Image (cartoon, grey):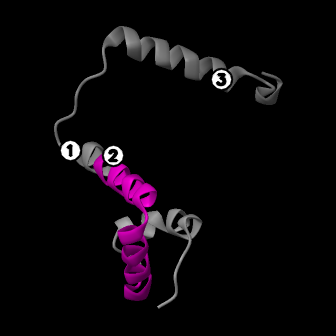
Amino acid sequence: MKKISCQEVLDQLWEYLDEEARAELCSEINEHLERCHDCQVEVDSLRMTVRIFRCEDHTPVPVLLSDKLRAAMSAIDKDPDPDAR
């Protein structure tokens, strides 16, 4: 079986987590994760993030924070040259 690099794992991580990857790729990634602690941490972190966002319990954003975020996004949308920052 082909050994894959950390970059290859990271490039195909979403496929792997969505279980859309072909069996061969999953095997290669699993083998890589067994010997690469850094990639295993990355996979575990991403899995936890996905679980959090799929959670049915939605926490409301405080009104003040929501207002500040909307104002900031509006300012960004109105900026004619975002690269000039």
Amino acid type of the residue tagged 3 in the rendering: Ile
Per the rendering, the mark at residue 30 is: none
Task: Identify the residue shown where x is 65% and y is 23%.
Answer: 76
**Mark nearer the viewer, 1 or 3:** 1
Alpha carbon separation for disc pair 3 and 2: 26 Å
Q: Is residue 78 left or right of residue 5?
A: right
Q: Nearer the viewer, residue 10 or 49?
A: 10
- Identify the residue under disc 3: 76
Task: Give the magenta part as a residue range.
Answer: 22-49
Tell me which residue sits at (44%, 82%) in the image.
25
Which numbered disc, 2 or 1, marks the residue that appears first in the sequence?
2
Judge the density around disc 2: few (<14), some (14-19), many (≥20) Cα neighbours within 10 Å.
few
Q: For mark 1, does the 10 Å Cα neighbourhood hold few (<14), some (14 to 19), or many (20 or more) residues?
A: few
The residue sitting at the top extreme is: 64
Task: Give the residue drawn at x 43%, y 70%.
Answer: 15
Q: Main secondary structure of the magenta part?
A: helix
- Where disc 3 sits, the SS reads helix
Percent position of residue 8, x then y: 56, 70
**Residue bearing the label numbered 1:** 55
Q: Which residue is mark 2?
A: 49
- Furthest toward the front, the residue is 35
Q: Quadrant location of residue 26?
A: bottom left
Position of residue 67 measured from the top left corner of the image (x, y, whole percent): 43, 12
Q: Amino acid at mark 1?
A: Cys
> How many labels sit on residues?
3
Amino acid carrying label 2: it is Thr
Residue 54 image point, x, y percent: 25, 48
